[in-house]
Amino acid sequence: DFCEEALLRNYFKEKFDKNVEITLAKQGVKAKLLNMAKKNAAEYLEKSVDKIRHRDDMTVNACMRLKQLLNLEKYPRRMECYDISNISGVDKVGSMVVFIDGEADRSSYRRFKIRTVEGANDF
């Protein structure tokens, strides 16, 4: 008997219109499996939280650091980064990548074919 038993029974009754019997293994193989499942769930939760913290550190926190370094009033929500390249000295292309709140927004990426400059010129 555990404290969430009634809550789980009600959930299954409402969700699936079924009555369920809930038993809790206290010893033996089933208890060992239950303990292993609890341990795995705790490890997964810890890794998930660490992953979220790392993502926040690499995105929003990085934007806040940029705000401080560049003395901006607000942190940069949208950043566009450009690069100009020459392919075999013939084709001149530009590319743009976009970050929103520190995360790549791949749907906003663009590629440009440059027609106004003759010869190799990255400027």
Image (cartoon, grey):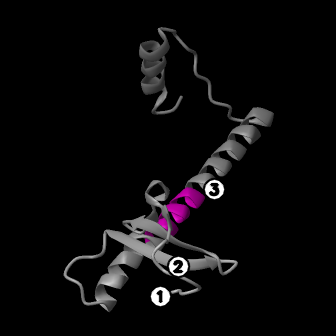
Q: Left or right: where does residue 76 sit relative to residue 74?
A: right
Q: Residue at x 45, y 64 (%)?
A: 103
Q: Secondary structure at mark 2?
A: strand
CA separation, marks 1 and 3? 51 Å
Q: Point out the residue furthest to the right here.
A: 29
Q: Secondary structure at mark 1?
A: loop
Q: Amino acid at mark 2?
A: Ile
Q: Left or right: where does residue 67 sit relative to residue 61?
A: left
Q: Nearer the viewer, residue 52 or 84?
A: 84
The answer to which of marks 1 and 2 sits earlier in the sequence is 2
Q: Residue at x 62, y 24 (%)?
A: 23
Residue stretch rendered in magenta on the structure = 46-56
Q: Does the residue at mark 1 contact the one at mark 2 (Cβ under 8 Å)? A: yes
Task: Name the residue tied to disc 3.
Answer: 43
Residue 28 image-quadrant placement: top right
Figure check: 66 above or below 1: below
Q: Main secondary structure of the magenta part?
A: helix
Residue 43 image-quadrant placement: bottom right
CA separation, marks 1 and 2? 8 Å
Task: Name the residue tied to disc 1.
Answer: 123
Image spot of residue 114 (x, y percent): 49, 71
Task: Name the residue tied to disc 2.
Answer: 84
| Location of the N terminus (image quadrant) | top right
Figure check: 101 above or below 24: below
Label 1 CA crowd tier, 10 Å (few <14, some 14–19, many 20+): few
